[in-house]
């Protein structure tokens, strides 16, 4: 089966090569770090130090790794940390947030055994920690053959992903046998992974480390920069559309046009598309909208302070804007993308709105809905969503007490669920060894319970 997988991977690469080349030419995707993706990178000089390789995929996993890296540095100060990502956006963010913590930041290899072997030889890790659910069969198999312990950390497995993996259950059982430990976010995630063949004796539940993320380093100065340049103040409430996908920008812009024509609050809108290659597309949409707008990447202009809409066409800055927003719509949830992380805006007390498609964060959204700590739209057509989103935001703007209550409940729920990072590090002790310095554990260790995802 591994041979068939590798063959299909190679054929898929050849078939998609023209698309890769087009995206590389137009957006710079995939071309960055191409040699590293083939396993060609300079080795780490480790000496007697141990190396912990933490693999993230993109921005979300890189953000989630921050509290884990911070705690590892505290508890294992003599260990070296290597960080890998797959996407350009993840790589850019990793190089910023881990520039003082990581001995090496690089692109994850293509999942051919020879590429994985070359990368493993260069990094020479003592342990590999894989964030969330990045299961690359050949890479994991090569780690097992080299006796390198691998743990899945902050793991999650949605019902949709479970159904896809179940088609290849026999193969997945072999892939999962290469994991030494799977630390999952919820009991439901652990049960789904076990149903695919993961040894239940190697499966634990810790909660979601994203509750422990905290503010970005240097975030306060960046927040002030946004505040000063765009004149963001409480007089004109800021509505932030975060991590949006098509067609959400069209829905949001049209809804906002309805809103500004009726609202006395004079709201302002900031849009942060999820994928950088869509920045230009959303810019064209704003040009045609008839609204006054500015882009973050442009040179500062006196007119920036009067812009009705701000396009956040930058990487890694979204976390610094949440505290400026009264209302945050988290994207990928009207679009059928499964939704994105609501914890960051909730942690600063923003009133969060999501669409109906939130299966990537089902347990979290369900808990927030039950606590009255979020507003979730019903399933509806894109055209109906324009009026519904405008109406929902309008209702919140005229009721600031409700906005504060939703934000306060959300912030409390986040605080109640902190501590997953310390629980995770305790569960990793058989792989990492005992801490070199002992830090206080936040909350009880509940290895087999089901904390909020």
Image (cartoon, helix red, strand yellow):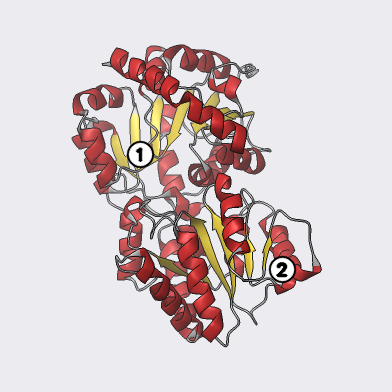
Above-or-below relation of 210 to 33: below
Q: Nearer the viewer, residue 47 or 353?
A: 353
Residue 361 found in image quarter: bottom left
> Circle 2 is placed at which residue position?
230
Above-or-below relation of 308 to 17: below
Above-or-below relation of 63 to 10: below
> Circle 1 is placed at which residue position?
183
Point out residue 304 in the picture as x, y percentages from the top left corner. 74, 68
Q: Nearer the viewer, residue 431 or 203?
A: 203
Q: Residue at x 43, y 54 (%)?
A: 340
Regarding mark 2 in the picture, which secondary structure is present there?
A: helix
Q: Residue at x 69, y 57 (%)?
A: 296
Position of 195 with respect to 55 (left or right) is left
Residue 443 found in image quarter: bottom left
The answer to whether residue 42 of the structure is visible from this angle is yes
The answer to whether residue 350 of the structure is visible from this angle is no
Point out residue 311 in the picture as x, y percentages from the top left corner. 62, 60
Q: Residue at x 53, y 44 (%)?
A: 59
Q: CA distance from mark 1 to mark 2?
A: 42 Å
Point out residue 373 in the picture as x, y percentages from the top left corner. 39, 71
Q: Assess whether mark 2 and mark 1 are in contact (beta carbons under 8 angstroms).
A: no
Above-or-below relation of 160 to 172: below
- Quarter of the image with the N terminus is top left
Judged by depth in the image, the label closer to the viewer, 1 or 2, is: 2
């Amino acid at each position: 089966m591994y041979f068939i997988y590798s063959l299909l991977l190679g054929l898929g690469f050849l078939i998609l090569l023209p698309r890769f080349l087009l995206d590389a030419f137009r957006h710079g995707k995939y071309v960055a770090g191409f040699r590293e993706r083939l396993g060609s990178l300079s080795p780490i000089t480790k000496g007697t130090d141990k190396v912990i390789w933490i693999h993230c995929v993109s921005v979300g996993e890189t953000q989630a790794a921050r509290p884990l890296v911070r705690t590892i540095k505290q508890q294992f100060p003599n260990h070296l940390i290597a960080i890998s990502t797959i996407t350009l956006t993840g790589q850019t963010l990793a190089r910023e947030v881990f520039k003082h913590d990581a001995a090496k930041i690089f692109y994850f290899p293509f999942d051919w055994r020879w590429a994985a072997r070359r990368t493993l030889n260069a990094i020479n890790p003592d342990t590999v920690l894989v964030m969330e659910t990045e299961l690359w069969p050949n890479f994991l198999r090569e780690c097992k053959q080299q006796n390198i312990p691998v743990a899945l950390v902050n793991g999650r497995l949605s019902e949709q992903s479970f159904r896809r993996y179940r088609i290849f259950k026999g193969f997945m059982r072999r892939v999962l046998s290469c994991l030494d430990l799977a630390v999952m976010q919820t009991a439901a995630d652990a049960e789904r992974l076990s149903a695919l063949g993961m040894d239940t004796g190697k499966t634990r539940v810790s909660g979601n480390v994203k509750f422990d993320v905290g503010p970005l380093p240097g975030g306060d100065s960046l927040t002030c920069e946004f505040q000063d340049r765009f004149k963001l103040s409480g007089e004109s409430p800021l509505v932030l559309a975060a991590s949006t996908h098509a067609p959400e920008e069209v829905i949001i812009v049209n809804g906002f046009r309805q809103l500004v024509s009726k609202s006395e609050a004079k709201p302002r809108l900031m849009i942060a598309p999820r994928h950088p290659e869509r920045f230009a597309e959303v810019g064209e949409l704003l040009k045609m909208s008839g609204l006054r707008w500015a882009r973050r990447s442009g040179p500062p202009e006196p007119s920036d302070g009067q812009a009705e809409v701000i396009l956040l066409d930058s990487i890694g800055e979204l976390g610094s804007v949440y505290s400026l927003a009264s209302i945050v719509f988290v994207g990928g949830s009207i679009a059928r993308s499964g939704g994105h992380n609501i914890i960051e805006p909730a942690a600063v007390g923003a009133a969060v709105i999501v669409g109906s498609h939130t299966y990537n964060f089902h347990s979290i959204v369900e808990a927030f809905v039950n606590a009255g700590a979020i507003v979730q739209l019903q399933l509806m057509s894109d055209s109906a969503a324009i009026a519904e989103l405008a109406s929902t935001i309008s209702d919140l703007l005229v009721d600031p007490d409700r906005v504060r209550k939703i934000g306060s409940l959300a912030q409390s729920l986040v605080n109640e669920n902190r501590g997953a990072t310390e629980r995770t590090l305790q569960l990793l002790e058989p792989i990492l060894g005992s801490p070199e310095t002992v830090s206080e554990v936040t909350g009880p260790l509940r290895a087999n319970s089901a904390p909020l995802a």
